[in-house]
Image (cartoon, rainbow, N blue to C red):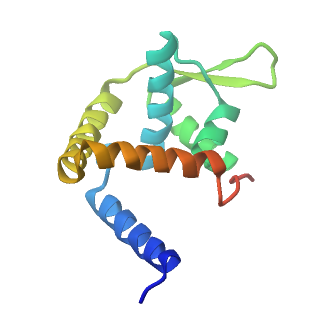
Amino acid sequence: METLDERIITAWIKLTGVLKNTRITQDMIYNEAVVMNLVYNRYLEDGEGLVSFKEIVSRTKMLKSLVNRTIDSLVKQGYLEKTDGQDKRTTLVRAKNFDVFLKEHEKTLALVRNIIATIGEEDAEAFVRIADKIAANDPLGSADD
């Protein structure tokens, strides 16, 4: 009989395989979509959408170097703009253009709706609760350069 820890590993591998194969993002690089989602959610919260580089690193668990490359790519493509924070050591980003991201986001939402239809709203709520609990306790530690 397989132990619970072995079953969790197996379930994790199956889930990541399904999500990877569905390519959650198709017209944007995954990390770009993750950063844009963070900026977009902030924009929905406050109407401005300013997010610090430090917060992006913290919330996405990406390496600083990867966040830097991702932001530079999004700036070059015209999706984000950089601005200085209150002190010169803080770099902030805000969206210049959500068009491509919103098209990609709608595809992702359609995938999520299919998942909800498959597992039901109660299990979907449980999944969110469990994922939030895991993320809040960060059992793998923080990624950092």
Looking at this view, is 90 or 130 the one in front?
130
Q: Is residue 119 above or below residue 21?
A: above
Instruction: Give the residue drawn at x 61%, y 49%.
Output: 62
Looking at this view, is 44 or 68 the one in front?
44
Q: Quadrant of residue 102?
A: top left
Q: In the rendered image, is residue 105 in sight?
A: yes
Query: Which residue of the protein is positioned furthest toward the bottom in this rendering?
Result: 1
Q: Is residue 78 above or below residue 120?
A: above
Q: Is residue 111 above or below residue 51?
A: below
Query: Position of 106 compared to 80: left or right?
Result: left
Q: In the rendered image, is residue 29 in sight?
A: no
Query: Position of 34 compared to 93: left or right?
Result: left
| Residue 137 horizontal/vertical position (percent) | 65, 50
Query: Position of 96 compared to 63: left or right?
Result: left
Instruction: Give the residue drawn at x 58%, y 18%.
Output: 50
| Residue 24 horizontal/vertical position (percent) | 32, 50
Total residue callouts = 0
Image quarter of the N terminus: bottom left
Q: Quadrant of residue 18?
A: bottom left
| Residue 120 horizontal/vertical position (percent) | 22, 47
Instruction: Give the residue drawn at x 77%, y 13%.
Output: 86
Instruction: Give the residue drawn at x 62%, y 48%.
Output: 61
